[in-house]
Amino acid sequence: MKRGMTLIELLLSLAVTGIIGVTVTAMLFGVTQGTASRNDMRNLVVKHQAVLGRVGSAIRTSKTVLGSSSTYLVLWIADSNGDAAPNLAELRWMKRDTATSELKAYKVAFPTSMTQAQKDAANTAYTLNDNFLTVAAALESNTYVVAETWATSVTALAWSLNSGTAQQATLVSFRVTLNCDAGDDMGMGAACLRNNGVSAGSGAGGSTP
């Protein structure tokens, strides 16, 4: 005749089953957390590569650094009209928006409906002695200036030039710090200007850090 389980045996069985269940749950949670952490790190690496690539490309395809600060990097893309001076349409600048922690890139885009004469009239001419950090800040409200967000959750951004005078710089190094669930993570890059700056004595431009 079969003997039924005693109360003690039943309680022991339930306890062992509970321990096994808790252990398995903890193992599965650990695996899930590990996978999520690896995915977060992978996404952060991809994001860093994208941001550093865009910044580096912008620098490499530009003629001269017109100014740099802890917030801005102002670039002269090219002397498109050959007048040896930067014009509105030839400017590009990058800025870390401290209010939104976004890295933004700015450039001028005249409407296609404008005639060439209208574009020429709106294409403000500057001199190399202008303070382009002030110029860039003022231009952000310009009708023809468009902004593109290159990265979010940017907690820090730093530029380093290989010359104390921005317009003499031939190399720009940069550090971008992005925030993720695990904390802040910094990526670094460097890029040479397309034509190695302007000749000595051409102008002062903005200050360097």
Image (cartoon, helix red, strand yellow):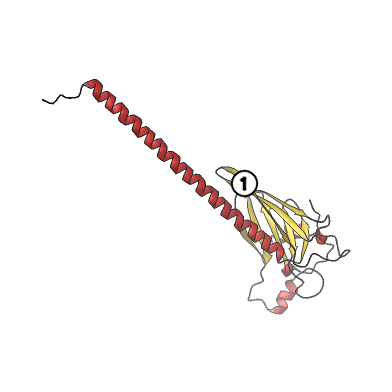
Q: Where is residue 201 in the image (x, y as percent from the top left)?
A: 89, 63
Q: Position of residue 63 (x, y in %)?
A: 76, 67
Q: Where is residue 143 in the image (x, y as percent from the top left)?
A: 67, 65
Q: Name the residue under label 1.
A: 185
Give the residue drawn at x 31%, y 26%.
15
**The N terminus sits in image quarter:** top left
User: Seen in the image, is 196 located left or right of residue 111?
Assistant: right
What residue occupies the far front of the structure in this picture?
1
What residue occupies the far bottom of the structure in this picture?
116
Give the residue drawn at x 64%, y 72%.
111
Q: Is residue 150 visible?
A: no
Q: Is disc 1 surrounded by few (<14), some (14 to 19) or many (20+) residues within 10 Å?
A: some
Q: In which quarter of the image is residue 49?
A: bottom right
User: Seen in the image, is 148 located left or right of residue 35?
Assistant: right
User: Seen in the image, is 199 located left or right of residue 110?
Assistant: right
Whether 88 is drawn above or below 114: the answer is above
| Badge 1 element | strand
Q: Quadrant of residue 67?
A: bottom right
Q: Can residue 182 be seen in this view?
A: yes
Residue type at the position of mark 1: Asp
Q: Where is residue 43 in the image (x, y as percent from the top left)?
A: 54, 52
What residue occupies the far right of the structure in this picture?
201
Name the foreground residue: 97 vs 17: 17
Q: Number of numbered discs present?
A: 1
Give the residue drawn at x 74%, y 67%.
194
User: Seen in the image, is 83 located left or right of residue 145?
Assistant: right
